[in-house]
Amino acid sequence: MRILYGLPAKIEDCMKKKVWLKSGGYLIIEQTEAMNVIDVNSGKNITGKQNIFAKVNMEAAEECMRQIRLRNLSGMILIDFINMEQVQEYTDLEAEIRRLCQLDPVMIHFIDFTGLGIAELTRVKKANHLLTIRITNDIIIKYAA
């Protein structure tokens, strides 16, 4: 038997609304009864860099898909990426989202970008999402060595 220390703290980290990106941008993740919403923000990473919004959005797309899997989000998922100027940037972002969707073991579909530039996805519900899990400080997780 092995005991995993710090697991409640790690799960608490997974449930925070704000997730920082390596680029200095961040995600705000909101779960409601009707849908899940992820807002991408450039944060402190906006000065003097060309094409920064496209780069932050590409990094955010990968982190969004990671968070969707980690939190086991399902149903309608809306991702509000940072607005970009070039149509090609949206095309590249869409291709990346579609590629990332194929890696998810749970069926997830990228629908389209709305007129406001919000990505629409749907994901099949397989189990409860992370917010429904209750863990106390004295939990012991056992698994075969």
Image (spheres, rainbow, N blue to C red):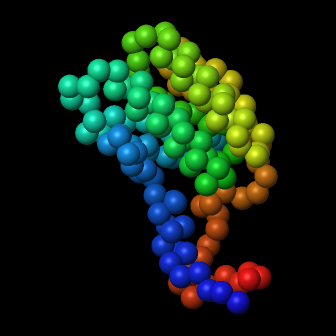
Quarter-of-image position of residue 49: top left
Q: Is residue 32 visible?
A: no
The reply, left or right, for residue 102 in relation to residue 33 is: right
Quarter-of-image position of residue 138: bottom right
Image quarter in which the C terminus is found: bottom right
Where residue 33 sits in the image (x, y, percent)? 63, 47
Tell me the residue at 79%/52% (across/down).
Answer: 126
Asked if 141 appears above or below 92 in the picture, the reply is below
Asked whether 127 or 59 is in front, the reply is 59
The reply, left or right, for residue 132 in relation to residue 116 is: right
Tell me the residue at 51%/69% (across/down).
Answer: 10
Q: Residue furthest top?
A: 87
Where residue 124 sits in the image (x, y, percent)? 77, 43
Where residue 31 sits in the image (x, y, percent)? 56, 48
Tell me the residue at 72%/59% (across/down).
Answer: 128
Image quarter in which the N terminus is found: bottom right
Where residue 22 sits in the image (x, y, percent)? 38, 45
Tell me the residue at 50%/11% (across/down).
Answer: 88
The reply, left or right, for residue 107 in relation to residue 99 is: right
